[in-house]
């Protein structure tokens, strides 16, 4: 079945040689696993062809290369698989050859773990369900907290994927954590991170036609056991449909039909909106015409603005010419008259200045005389104050002396009342004299203030 299926697939892909499409078929029986780097392409590389008859032709045997012959790797081939704490392997690195590779070992030695690591790292979706009940974290080696898988893919030749970006080798890394998370990481030849999403990985696998979910490409133990032990034609047909991706195509056709139905409904809905849209288009057309008229008006406005600007320039030139003419007339006619008037005014100002100087001299003389009078007034006031004080003192001494004389000459009896009366009369006389003295002082102060005021006025007139 595998040989017939590979021949049919090679013919359906319309290639010149079956070895270009399927250079080798992965065969696995019991403890022997045959792997190869070249794989089949995605479903969009298949074409539906009319029924045809296959003729079995015995191919010529190819001779094995001599030992030590350097065989180049094909583009998209798996160069290396490296695992760490994955299933039963603690640290394992497997370098694959350019053609068919056999991994041989006893049962339980970890042969299938290498194929599983390759499938898991390249994004197989059902690998966790087939090999472990715990999901992705079931691949972690017992006693470890995480597992790591790396796969190196050759990227060279004419159909290389962006060789200036990725280089000759693309490395896909997947780390499985104890929580079950298993993010991807894609690195180029120089170790630079080129992406960490499934989309980045899918872009690489689609470019190299790597489909790890296809049982023809990667046949796990469960798939091979089911294929070999099942004798039902329906199971074999299901396997054929799954291997040729017809099942996916059927699902995609059904999905496309649903999309077509949705599009038809949207088209019918949009057709109902066509009259409204046409009315809107007509309205917008009218608005466009209005806008076009507005644009024409704007252009005319710009033209008028330019004309207005030049009109202002013309007006400014006329004003400049008039101003120039007036300036010439001023220089020729008015300027001489102004010069004569300025000369007369200067002469008049000289005469006035002489008069002002005479007046200032008189004011200065008057101010000096006022100052002298003020000094004399001050001296007279001081002398007057001194004399009043002496007079008051002498009058007081006189009253005291008269009282002493009266007391000595007065006989005993009612002399006390008469003495008191005389004393009161003497005090009243002294008080009246003191009032006169104060009144005189006030009059002197007023005269001094009048003299200072007159002196200030004279100074202001002089200034």
Image: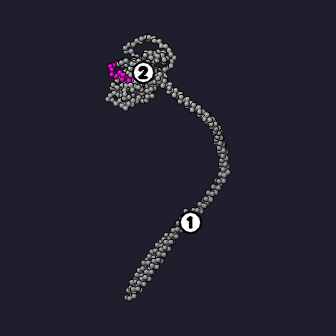
> Is residue 243 in view from this perspective?
no
Residue closest to the eye, 431 or 230: 230
- Which quadrant: the C terminus? bottom right
Residue closest to the eye, 295 or 229: 229
Q: Position of residue 341 (x, y in %)?
A: 65, 55
- Which quadrant: the N terminus? top left
Q: Which residue is mark 2?
A: 215
Residue closest to the eye, 458 or 176: 176
Residue at image point 39% right, 88% down:
414
User: Is 440 colored magenta in this rendering?
Assistant: no
Q: Range of the magenta residues?
A: 104-118
**Element at label 1:** helix
User: Is 112 colored magenta in this rendering?
Assistant: yes
Q: In the displayed structure, does residue 355 sit left or right of residue 439?
A: right
In the drawing, what numbered circle is on residue 362? 1
Mark 1, other Cα within 10 Å: few <14 / some 14–19 / many ≥20: few
């Amino acid at each position: 079945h595998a040989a017939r299926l590979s021949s049919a697939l090679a013919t359906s892909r319309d290639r010149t040689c079956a070895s270009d499409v399927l250079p080798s078929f992965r065969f696995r029986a019991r403890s022997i696993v045959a792997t190869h780097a070249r794989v089949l392409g995605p479903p969009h590389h298949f074409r539906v062809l009319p029924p045809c008859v296959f003729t079995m032709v015995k191919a010529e045997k190819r001779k094995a290369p001599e030992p030590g012959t350097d065989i180049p790797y094909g583009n998209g081939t798996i160069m290396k698989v490296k695992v760490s704490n994955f299933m039963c392997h603690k640290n394992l690195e497997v370098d694959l050859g350019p053609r068919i590779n056999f991994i041989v070992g006893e049962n339980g030695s970890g042969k299938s773990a290498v194929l599983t690591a390759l499938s898991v790292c390249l994004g197989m979706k059902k690998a966790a369900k087939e090999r472990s009940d715990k999901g992705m974290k079931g691949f972690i080696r017992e006693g470890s907290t995480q597992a790591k898988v790396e796969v190196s893919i050759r990227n060279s030749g004419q159909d290389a994927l962006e060789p200036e970006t990725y280089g000759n080798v693309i490395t896909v890394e997947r780390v499985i954590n104890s929580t079950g998370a298993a993010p991807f990481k894609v690195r180029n030849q120089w170790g630079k991170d080129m992406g960490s999403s499934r989309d980045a990985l899918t872009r690489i696998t689609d470019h190299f036609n790597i489909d790890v979910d296809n049982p023809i490409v990667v046949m796990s133990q469960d798939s091979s056991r089911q294929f070999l032990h099942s004798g039902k034609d329906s199971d074999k047909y299901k396997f054929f449909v799954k291997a040729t991706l017809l099942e996916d195509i059927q699902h995609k056709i059904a999905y496309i039909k649903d999309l077509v139905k949705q599009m038809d409904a949207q088209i019918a809905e949009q057709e109902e909106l066509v009259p409204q849209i046409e009315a809107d288009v007509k309205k917008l057309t009218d608005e466009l015409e209005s806008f076009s008229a507005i644009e024409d008006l704007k252009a005319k406005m710009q033209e008028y603005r330019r004309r207005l600007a030049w009109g202002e320039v013309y007006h400014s030139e006329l004003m400049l010419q008039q101003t120039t003419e007036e300036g010439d007339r001023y220089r020729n006619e008015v300027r001489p008259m102004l010069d004569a008037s300025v000369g007369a005014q200067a002469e008049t100002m000289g005469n006035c200045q002489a008069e002002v100087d005479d007046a200032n001299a008189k004011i200065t003389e008057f101010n000096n005389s006022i100052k002298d009078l003020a000094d004399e007034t001050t001296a007279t006031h001081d002398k007057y104050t001194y004399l009043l004080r002496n007079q008051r003192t002498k009058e007081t001494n006189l009253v005291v002396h008269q009282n002493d004389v009266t007391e000595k000459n007065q006989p005993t009896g009612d002399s006390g009342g008469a003495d008191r009366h005389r004393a009161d009369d003497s005090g009243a006389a002294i008080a009246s004299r003191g009032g006169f003295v104060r009144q005189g002082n006030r009059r002197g102060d007023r005269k001094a203030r009048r003299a200072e005021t007159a002196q200030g006025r004279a100074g202001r007139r002089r200034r």
